[in-house]
Amino acid sequence: MNFSAQEVGSNGFNILLFIIVFALLTVIFKKRPEVKTTKTTSPTTLPFDLLDLEKELNEKKTENEELKNQCHRLTEEIKQQKEELGENFKRETFYTLQPLFSTYPTIKKVTDTQELPAKNFVPMLIYLDNLINNWGYTTIGTVWEQVAYNPQYHEADSDDIQETELVYIRFVGYRQGETIIYPAKVSRTLPDLL
């Protein structure tokens, strides 16, 4: 078999062309290993399981924020209840000790004006003044002070005492701010002790 140079050149070119095309097709269609990529540009392009995780994370963030708000609210409620319980305790204790609180200033006044054995007891009761001050209570009037009768602050010993009539405080009352804890007991006359 004799091939001419032209035939060899033509066949060689065809073979060379075939090899180049085959190599290109192999490179182009070669099976590549899968590379997992996640795009974070848009939630709609994310894989299904990543979308679920993101949704769950957002739910947990919302739940966490709600729990923080609830915790803050409960802390404030506990603080308010603590204050209310403290005030209720003081008020209930005061009502229990009220007879002593009411008579104590009168006893002090009597001991200032007369020689009585009760004078020896007054120093033992000084803690009552401290307790009343610590609770934030103030007296309504002073013992034997003459004042204009005011039914909001005073309890008269007689039903016929008229508002603004001059009366004497026989037993002081107590208040806390604008709240009347116990009205002062008043009378038209001073006790016979004077």
Image: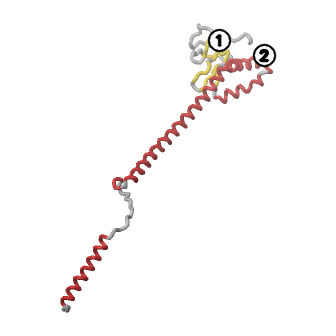
Instruction: Residue at the far top: name it.
Output: 160
Report the front residue among 90 and 191.
Answer: 90
Circle 2 packing at 10 Å, graded few (<14), some (14-19), many (20+), is few
Numbered disc 2: secondary structure: loop
Total numbered badges shown on the rendered structure = 2
Snapshot quadrant of residue 23:
bottom left
Q: Amino acid at mark 2?
A: Gln
Q: Position of residue 140 (x, y in %)?
A: 63, 21
Task: Tell me the crowding category of disc 1: few under 14, some 14 to 19, or many 20 or more residues within 10 angstroms, Cα based.
Answer: many
Measured as percent of width and height from the top left, residue 192 is found at 73, 10
Q: Position of residue 42 (x, y in %)?
A: 35, 55
1 relative to 93 in the view: left or right: left
Q: Which is more toward the observer, 108 or 12?
A: 12
Q: Residue at x 56, y 34 (%)?
A: 78
Write down the residue under mark 2. Answer: 114
Q: Quadrant of the N terminus?
A: bottom left
For the point 30% across and 73% down, the residue is: 26
User: Secondary structure under badge 1?
Assistant: strand
> Quarter of the image holding residue 174?
top right
Name the quadrant of the C terminus. top right
Chain-order first, disc 2 or disc 1? 2
- Give the residue pinned by disc 1: 187
Q: Provide residue 175's location: percent of width, then percent of height.
A: 61, 23
The answer to whether mark 2 and mark 1 are in CB contact below 8 A is: no
